[in-house]
Image (spheres, grey):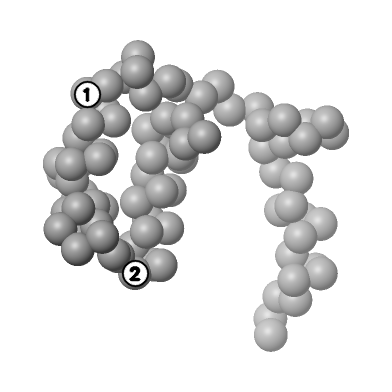
Amino acid sequence: ALFSSRGWRPVHGRKGFPKGGEALVEWLQPAQHENAWRRWATGHTGLPLVDAAMRQLQQTGYCSNRVRQNAASLLAKDLRLDWR
């Protein structure tokens, strides 16, 4: 493998976290940004992959790990909505 997990973690493992372990991200509360939360949850983000994942999840109760990761990434990284 080009990057072993040992070699990769020290470079990227603490990115975005101070020494104490708390994230440096200011999370937005879903209750205060209900429109963004509702668009994400109902599959109306305008991003076909995320929308398809959320609609499949609603209809079948299942979506693959890959699209689930993409949907979660949009929620946390792009919308900055608190996922906890």
Mark earlier in primary sequence (1, 2): 1
Q: Which mark is residue 15?
A: none
Closer-to-camera residue (79/33):
33
Asked which quadrant contains residue 35, the reply is top left
- Circle 1 SS class: helix
What is the crowding at mark 2: few (fewer than 14 residues within 10 Å), some, or many (at least 20)?
Answer: few
Q: Are the residues flagged by discs 1 and 2 in contact, CB closer than 8 Å?
A: no
Quarter of the picture holding the N terminus: bottom right
- Kindly identify the amino acid type of the residue bearing the numbered disc 2: Ser
Q: Relative to residue 9, is residue 41 depicted above or below?
A: above
**Mark 2 residue element:** loop
Q: Is residue 39 left or right of residue 12?
A: left
Q: What amino acid is found at the position of numbered circle 1 in the picture? A: Asn
Q: State the residue lying farthest toward the top.
A: 32
- What residue appears at the point 81 percent right and 57 percent down from the top-left corner? 10
Residue 14 horizontal/vertical position (percent)? 75, 45
Q: Residue furthest right?
A: 19
Residue depicted at x 45% and y 21% = 28
Choose between 35 and 15: the one closer to the eye: 35
Q: Is residue 63 left or right of residue 3?
A: left
* Location of residue 51 in the rendering, given as x and y in whole percent from the top left corner: 19, 51
What's the CA distance linking mark 1 and mark 2?
25 Å
Give the labeled residue for mark 2. 64
Q: Which residue is mark 1?
A: 35
